[in-house]
Amino acid sequence: MTTHTIKVPSLDKWMNYLVAKGLSYGTIEQYCIRFRIFPHTEVSQETVNLYLTEHAGQLNRSFVRNYLDFIGNKDIVIPKKTGRRKIRVPETVSQEHLEIIRFAMYELNELYGIMFDLQYQGGLRREELVELKIDSFEWDNWIKDKSKPCRLHVIGKGDKERIVIISPELATRITNYYRERLKIGKIKFTDKMFRMGKRRWWEVLKIVSEKIIDKRIKPHMLRRSRATDLWNTGKFDLMDIKNFLGHTDISTTQLYINMDKEKSLKKFEDAINEEHKS
């Protein structure tokens, strides 16, 4: 067994390495937890294989990949996944619960309500939501006809820009909220809309949902729910949803959508009935 004995690196150096790579706070936090239990002193192909056997999951595989890059070990390879992969049904929120939480958000704080609507309608990631600026919207075009939806420019992963559509009702609510604040100079068009980090937004949504519907709702569930709701209208194909969410690979989009199996079965029933009649 080829074993590489190394001096255990410090947690500070590991964190600095992850920060330099531009990883999110949540990912760094998870990698640091795994850093504490990884067998640093004897790193070999065998110990890596054993670690990944005892600690399954993509997050652990990503941690090991980053760790090996960190210590400069290019000899060890990440073993390929084996066996059947369990299919996870994406967590979504029912329309009834969406309306209940939405109402509670607006009752608590109008800005919370606007954030909730923007994340759901735009299918936004929470980091995209908290980075929005007032001039991210095409206000000049929308003002010409306020009965029509408004376009919103979103900067997603890898600084890729996409456009999502916001309802005229929400666009009106946003302009009403910020008009006076802009007038008195409390905020500028180039400022961020929300003085809140993604962690705080996660906490707000968690606290409100647990209190109102006795269920913890996470920001990403709003994004998944929007994708599923759009898909179930039957008006959009997977490529439409992929572009809407800003995914690079359509296989990722498939994981986001909780497809309505009952609707699919109904289509087959209708088709077979038509065949029988003919």
Image (spheres, helix red, strand yellow):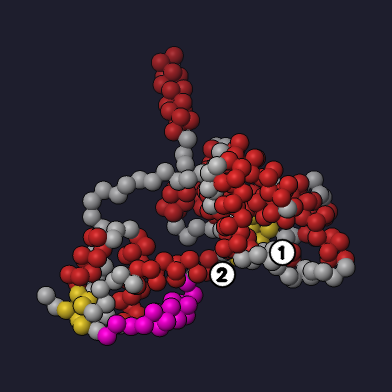
Where is residue 113 drawn, in percent x and y? 70, 51
Where is residue 224 drawn, in percent x and y? 52, 48
Question: Per the image, is 18 magenta?
Answer: yes
- The kind of residue tagged 2 is Asp
Residue indicated by mark 1: 193
Residues packed near mark 1 inside 10 Å, few (<14), some (14 to 19) or many (20 plus):
many
Where is residue 273 drawn, in percent x and y? 44, 18
Q: Earlier in the sequence, mark 2 or mark 1?
A: 2
Q: Secondary structure at mark 2?
A: helix
Please tell me whether residue 162 is drawn above or below residue 108 in the rendered image.
Answer: below
Horizontal side of residue 155 vs 50, given as left or right: right
Please tell me whether residue 249 is drawn above or below residue 195 in the rendered image.
Answer: above
Residue that extends furthest to the front in the rendered view of this protein: 211
Residues packed near mark 2 inside 10 Å, few (<14), some (14 to 19) or many (20 plus):
few
**Residue at position x 85%, y 70% in the image:** 185
- Any part of residue 150 in sight: no
Where is residue 155 drawn, in percent x and y? 60, 65
Label disc, if present, on residue 227 of the rendered structure? none
Question: Per the image, is 266 magenta?
Answer: no
Residue indicated by mark 2: 159
Horizontal side of residue 176 vs 13, given as left or right: right
Q: Do the CB atoms of the residues marked 2 and 1 lie less than 8 Å apart?
A: no
**Residue at position x 42%, y 52% in the image:** 251
Q: Which region shows up in magenta?
A: 7-23
Quadrant occupied by the N terminus: bottom left
Spatial separation of the CA atoms under disc 2 and disc 1: 19 Å
Work out whether residue 151 or residue 211 is closer to the camera in this orientation and state it: 211
**Residue at position x 34%, y 72% in the image:** 36
- The kind of residue tagged 1 is Met
Horizontal side of residue 37 vs 257, given as left or right: left
